[in-house]
C-alpha cells in the first residue's frame, strides 16, 4: 500500500547550471537571492528537511538530520515548465523547442486568425500583466485576441471573459495547438482568460495549458501501465497531455493545489501524486515580487509540516523544482538553474544525492513497483536501493 507524492515548487531554482551563460543567466540563484533580498527565509519545516544543507541560504542553516537532499540537473536543453516536468519523469527533450524573441512570424499569426475567426494584436514578448494592461482596452473595443510569448517556448492567447467565454478560448487554443506546423510547434499553447475593466484588468484562475505531446515514454506511463493509479494536481498533467494520468485535479493557485494534495494525502490508499505549485513562478517570480515569493514559500512550508504528520510508513515525499525564476535577474523570465531535492521516506539516513532530474521519476517507479526502467534515464535514490547495491 505504498504512496509517492512528488511536489514541484515551480521556479524554485538553487543556482546556475554550468551552461547558464548560454541562456543569459550567469549568476542566477533564485532561492538564495530571494533569501538575501527578504533578509533571510523563515521556513522551519523545509529547513529541518535540509533545504539549507543543499545551498547556503540566509536564514536557513544546515539541518542536523536532513532528509535525502541535493541538487538535480537536466540532461537536455531548456528552462521552462515543459522541459523541467518532462525531465523529472524521464523525458529528455532532444532539441530546444522553438522560441520567438521577436514575435511570431506572419504564418503563425495568420493561423491564429484562421482558426479563431478573430484578429490578433500584440505579437511580442510580454509578461501576462503587461499584455492585458497594454492591449486589454483595444481587445474589448475591437475583439482582437491578445497573442504574446516569452523567452520560453509558449504561444499565449489572452481574452476577456465578457468577450470570449473561457470555453471558446480553450477551443481556440486547442485548434491552434492541433494546427501548428512542426517547425513552429511550441511547447505550450496557453489560454489566458482575464476580467475586470481598463483600470483593473486581472487574470482569472481559468488558465489552461495545451502542451505538445512528449517525445518519449515517461515514468507516469510506466507507473500507469504497472497498475499504479496516477493523480496529478495543477498543470503537471496538462504538460504530459494526460498520458499516463488517471485523474487530473485542478490547481490554478497554490491554495487550491495545496488543498487538493492534502486531501489526496488524507484519502488516497495507494499510488502516485504529481503536484505543481505555480504561484512562486506565475504570480511572484515573473513579477520580481520578493515579499510575495517568500510568503508563498512560507505557506508551502506550513503545509509540508501538515503533510509530514499525515505520512504513512509506506510513503515517499519528494520536494523539488523544474527551473528557476530569479527575481534579481535583468529579465523577468525563467532562469537556467539546478533544482533542489528533498526526499522523506522510511527507512532512510541523512545523506546527499546529486543527479539528474530523472532520478525523481526513477525513485517513484522503484518505490511503488519495486523495479527500475531499462529504457528511461534516472537512478533511484531511495534507501533500499543503496542497501541492495551494497
Image (cartoon, rainbow, N blue to C red):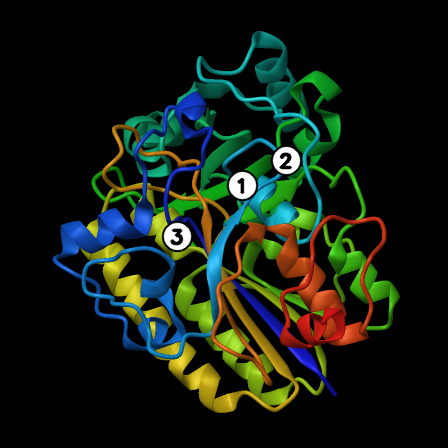
Name the disc covering residue 38, or none. none
Q: Residue at x 79, y 41 (%)?
A: 216
Figure check: 295 above or below 34: below
Q: Which residue is mark 2?
A: 172
Is residue 299 visible to us here? yes
Q: Nearer the viewer, residue 26 or 355?
A: 355
User: Which of disc 2 and disc 1 is earlier in sequence?
Assistant: 2
Classify mark 3: residues with Cα within 10 Å, few (<14), some (14-19) or many (20+).
many
Classify mark 2: residues with Cα within 10 Å, few (<14), some (14-19) or many (20+).
many
Is residue 170 visible to us here? no
* Image quarter in which the N terminus is found: bottom right
User: Which of disc 3 and disc 2 is earlier in sequence?
Assistant: 3
C-alpha gap between disc 1 and disc 2: 9 Å
Q: How far across and how far down the image is residue 166, in percent? A: 54, 47
Q: Nearer the viewer, residue 265 or 196?
A: 265
Of discs 1 and 3, which sits in the foreground? 3
Q: Which residue is mark 1?
A: 191
Q: Nearer the viewer, residue 38 or 255?
A: 38
Q: How far across and how far down the image is residue 32, in percent? A: 27, 51
Q: Which residue is mark 3?
A: 12
In which quadrant of the rendered view does residue 185 lie?
Answer: top right
Secondary structure at badge 2 equals helix
Amino acid at each position: 500500500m505504498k504512496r509517492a507524492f512528488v511536489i514541484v515548487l515551480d521556479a524554485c531554482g538553487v543556482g546556475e547550471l554550468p551552461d547558464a551563460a548560454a541562456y543569459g543567466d550567469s549568476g542566477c540563484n533564485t532561492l538564495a537571492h530571494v533569501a538575501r533580498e527578504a533578509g533571510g527565509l523563515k521556513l522551519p519545516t523545509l529547513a529541518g528537511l535540509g533545504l539549507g544543507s543543499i545551498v547556503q541560504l540566509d536564514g536557513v542553516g544546515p539541518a542536523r538530520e536532513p532528509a535525502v537532499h541535493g541538487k538535480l540537473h537536466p540532461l537536455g536543453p531548456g528552462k521552462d515548465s515543459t522541459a523541467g516536468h518532462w525531465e523529472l519523469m524521464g523525458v529528455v527533450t532532444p532539441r530546444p523547442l522553438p522560441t520567438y524573441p521577436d514575435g511570431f512570424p506572419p504564418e503563425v499569426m495568420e493561423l491564429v486568425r484562421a482558426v479563431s475567426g478573430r484578429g490578433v494584436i500584440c505579437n511580442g514578448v510580454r509578461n501576462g500583466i503587461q499584455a492585458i494592461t497594454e492591449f486589454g482596452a483595444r481587445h474589448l473595443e475591437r475583439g482582437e485576441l491578445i497573442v504574446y510569448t516569452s523567452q520560453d517556448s509558449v504561444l499565449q492567447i489572452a481574452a476577456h471573459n465578457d468577450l470570449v467565454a473561457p470555453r471558446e478560448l480553450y477551443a481556440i487554443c486547442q485548434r491552434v495547438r492541433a494546427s501548428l506546423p512542426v517547425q513552429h510547434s511550441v511547447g505550450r499553447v496557453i489560454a489566458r482568460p482575464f476580467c475586470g475593466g481598463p483600470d483593473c484588468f486581472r487574470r482569472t484562475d481559468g488558465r489552461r495549458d495545451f502542451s505538445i505531446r512528449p517525445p518519449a515514454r515517461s515514468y507516469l506511463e510506466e507507473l500507469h501501465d504497472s497498475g499504479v493509479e496516477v493523480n496529478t494536481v495543477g498543470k503537471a498533467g496538462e504538460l504530459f497531455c494526460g498520458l499516463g494520468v488517471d485523474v487530473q485535479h485542478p490547481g490554478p493557485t497554490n491554495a487550491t493545489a495545496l488543498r487538493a494534495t492534502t486531501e489526496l494525502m488524507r484519502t488516497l490508499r495507494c499510488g502516485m501524486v504529481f503536484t505543481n505549485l505555480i504561484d512562486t513562478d506565475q504570480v511572484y517570480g515573473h513579477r520580481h515580487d520578493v515579499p510575495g515569493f517568500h510568503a508563498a514559500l512560507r505557506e508551502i512550508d506550513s503545509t509540508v509540516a501538515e503533510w509530514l504528520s499525515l505520512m504513512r510508513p509506506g510513503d515517499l515525499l519528494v520536494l523539488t523544482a523544474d527551473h528557476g525564476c530569479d527575481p534579481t535577474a535583468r529579465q523577468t523570465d525563467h532562469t537556467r538553474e539546478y533544482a533542489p531535492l528533498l526526499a522523506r521516506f522510511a527507512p532512510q539516513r541523512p545523506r546527499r544525492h546529486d543527479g539528474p532530474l530523472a532520478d525523481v521519476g526513477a525513485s517513484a517507479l522503484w518505490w511503488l513497483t519495486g523495479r527500475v526502467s531499462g529504457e528511461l534515464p534516472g537512478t533511484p535514490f531511495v534507501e533500499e536501493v543503496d542497501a541492495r547495491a551494497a
